[in-house]
Amino acid sequence: MATGYFGNIKDAVTSIFEGLAVTASHLIRKPYTVQYPDRVPVRIQDTLPFRYRGILEVDLDICTGCLACERACPIDCIVIVVEKDKQTRQMLISQFDIDIAKCMYCGLCSEPCPTGSIHHTTEFEGADFSLESMIRRFVPEPIYAYKPSKGPETDPRIIPILNRGMRYVNEFAQPGGDKPAAEEA
Amino acid sequence: MQTLVDNLIASGMFGAHPPRDVIYGLFIFIFSLVVFLGVAFPFAGIVSWVERRVWARMQSRCGPNRVGPNGFLQWLADGLKHVCKEDLIPAESDETLFKMAPYLVILAFTLPWAVMPFSSSLILADLNVGILYMTSVTALTVVGVLMAGWASNDKWSLIGGIRSAAQIVSYEIPAGLSIFPVVLMTGTLSMQGIINAQGWAPWTWFAFSNPFTFIAANVLYISALAEGNRTPFDLPEAESELVAGFATEYSGMRYLFFFAAEWGNLFIIGAIITTLFLGGWKFPHVSNNPVVMNVLELITFNVKVLFLVFVSMWVRGTLPRVRIDQLMSLCWKYLVPISFVDMIGTALWLAIWPQGNSIAPWIMMALFAAIIVIFLGRVLHYFRRSRMELYLSPTI
């Protein structure tokens, strides 16, 4: 019994000793905390991967006005109005709205996009004071839709945008295997 | 302090025939106001912030660092928030007792400051029963806590209050017995008398004068933590089991009083240990100017006390809460017998070496240094094993 009694005291003293050493060693470690949003070394958005599903964005320079995204959206948060211009025989996009408040970030719209025009960004801070401000209007005034050229793209202004879009499409659709664009063709 | 007031009266500052009682009363009022509003309550507030920062770093977090420089004003923000809150009183409670309980707790926290020996002259009243007074008025907390628990008319509060009563009454015994060795060695209960029996050097402190007093210092510290309802002995307010224990029904200012008293009690715990075992305000005689000496002594005293306050935060960050049966068995089966052994051991030691052993303090110091070295080794071991970045700065 006596050994048990003194054994208990010894256990208590040594385990508290070790415990205090552990916490003291934490005192000189660097904290893990990321002090979002203002005290971060780099913006969190910049540290996110390319395929991160943030708020949707449309590159109107390479939008073909094919309406594939509008049809793919399961909750109809995308509204596109496209008309055919009689004189120039080109597609004229007069409205392209995405309701971010409805969007559920499923990514189904950016998979069928042939050029990678509609894509998720790494931006995720979308809080605002009204529901109206949640609707992103990408077409302030009607513009002509992008018409893919037969060969490789020649317009030097479009090339980097298109390259980025195709890379997005390829990488975004990669894990699924089938490319939706190939299916439609 | 009385001599100071006497000198002022003798200097004719209050006329030829001054009303002594009125002047004494006035000065007592002014001094207590300065001590409570200038020292005790800000200390309790600042400790609440320091404690949260220290815990946070021990858990690899940052802690409150937004209000003011490094979050220093967090305690003011919290205090203001509590003052602005509604003072809820449950309909079924015993209203008078419910309202009175926080004031009793705060009273038990403010009374010990009367005998707090900040320096050789900065002491409100050097009672000849100073340390006895200190231990007895701090035990008054139990009345307030029990009253709060009973008056709330709520099961959690009642369990918390009863636990607190059991805990504080039990731990009074080892705490009282651990004071005995020092009283035996000095033959006085006065705070200044005990400090004057020690010197500025660590080998003249009572903590290192013989093995029994060293153990007594540790037993007293553990018991004082238990009396102050500190983790690992915070059973009266165990959040995970009792919501907030005796403070469950309290809100606003009354709630703040309980916690100001709890944090402020840390200073009192540290002051008791410092006075009894760590040489109090003693500082080598470097100047003949009494003001300079008093300032140096004040700093010495506060550094020692604040170190002990830090240790209590450290313990709180390390140990989990004990069970109520473990709490009781720790007190009655371990601390009480150990403190009896300490008392008898010190008595025997004094019987053999009435003037104190001159070699023992050095052996004690060497052992203590060895413990510190082993401890630092363990800290380094754990730090290296974690493979984390070294970050010594207290700010983040």
Image: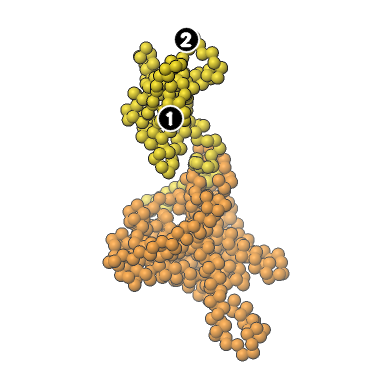
Chain colours: A yellow, B orange
Which chain does tag 2 point to?
A
Chain bearing mark 1: A
Q: Residue at x 43, y 38 (%)?
A: A133
Q: Residues within 10 Å of mark 1 (few under 14, many from 20)?
A: many
Q: Quadrant of residue B136?
A: bottom left
Residue occupying image coordinates x 50% and y 11%: A152
Q: Quadrant of residue B232?
A: bottom left
Look at mark 1 in the image and give the residue it sits on: A56
Type of residue at label 1?
Leu
Q: Which residue is mark 2?
A: A150
Callout 1 secondary element: strand
Measured from the top left, where is residue A117 in percent x and y?
Answer: 45, 23
Residue type of the residue flagged with mark 2: Lys
- Give above or below for A101 relative to B88: above
Whether residue B100 is situated above or below residue B203 in the rendered picture: below
Q: Is residue B17 above or below residue B332?
A: below
Lateral position of residue B384 relative to residue B136, left or right: right
The residue shown at (61%, 90%) is B17
* Mark seen at residue B44: none
Secondary structure of the residue carrying tag 2 is loop
What residue occupies the far top of the structure in this picture? A151
Q: Position of residue B145 (x, y in %)?
A: 37, 66
